[in-house]
Amino acid sequence: MTKKIEITCELEGLNLVDIYSLQEFQDDLKFLHRRKAAKLRKSIERYGITFPGYVWNSPYGLKIIDSHQRVRVIKIMLQEGWELEGNLFPVVFIKADNEKEAKKKVLLAASMYGEMTDSGLCDFLSNAHIDVEEIIDEIDIPYVDIDLESSSSGGGEGGDGSGKDRETMNKCPNCGHTW
């Protein structure tokens, strides 16, 4: 039985385009590490395509503004036998007058204006009744001081696999999670 990649975002107002018609447009701006690609893949396997990609419909084809990593991972999954109905990927078209403006929009999409904090994440997880272990293998939150690798290894092992407990530096007063 073929495994299917579901589209789980609302399709009203979105466009569906052949995933193979999407062209990378960020050059070497970002690199997808193997560990992070695995997390992204687990997210797609579990939740499907939850967010549309952002694409510029240029005179030379469909240029990806935002969703490079998702498109890369999904194409690998398709090569491995996964199915995406009609190879159709949901997108929103972004306006740009020329390539320079579109490249600026790649940078806008890659920007992170809000900063997540350790305590903010802890409070969010606590208020939502989410145990970080439920999602640790599916998310990547940069700039937050939580060692996700050692948290996911279980059994009190350190991130180096030595079996030694790591020293706890912080503890959330709401959910008790330590990091």
Image (cartoon, helix red, strand yellow):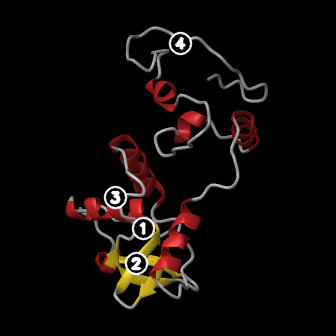
Cα separation, mark 3 vs mark 2, equals 17 Å
Which numbered mark, 4 or 1, is in the foreground of this view?
4
- In primary-sequence order, the first of circles 3 and 2 is 2
Cα separation, mark 1 vs mark 2, equals 23 Å
**Where is residue 178 drawn, in percent x and y?**
64, 22
Of 45 and 34, nearer the camera is: 34
Element type at mark 2: strand
| Residue contact at pointers 4 and 3, CB within 8 angstroms | no
| Residue contact at pointers 3 and 1, CB within 8 angstroms | no
- Looking at this view, name the residue that lies furthest to the front: 100
How packed mark 2 is, by other alpha carbons closer than 10 Å (few <14, some 14-19, many 20 or more), is: many
Q: Which residue is mark 1?
A: 6
Label for residue 166? 4
| Relative to 81, 178 lies left or right | right
How packed mark 1 is, by other alpha carbons closer than 10 Å (few <14, some 14-19, many 20 or more), is: some
Element type at mark 3: helix
Label for residue 73? 3
Element type at mark 1: loop
Cα separation, mark 3 vs mark 1, equals 14 Å
Q: Give the answer, above or below, for where 137 lies relative to 40.
A: above
Q: Which residue is mark 2?
A: 63
Cα separation, mark 4 vs mark 1, equals 39 Å
Q: Give the answer, above or below, for where 58 lies relative to 52.
A: below
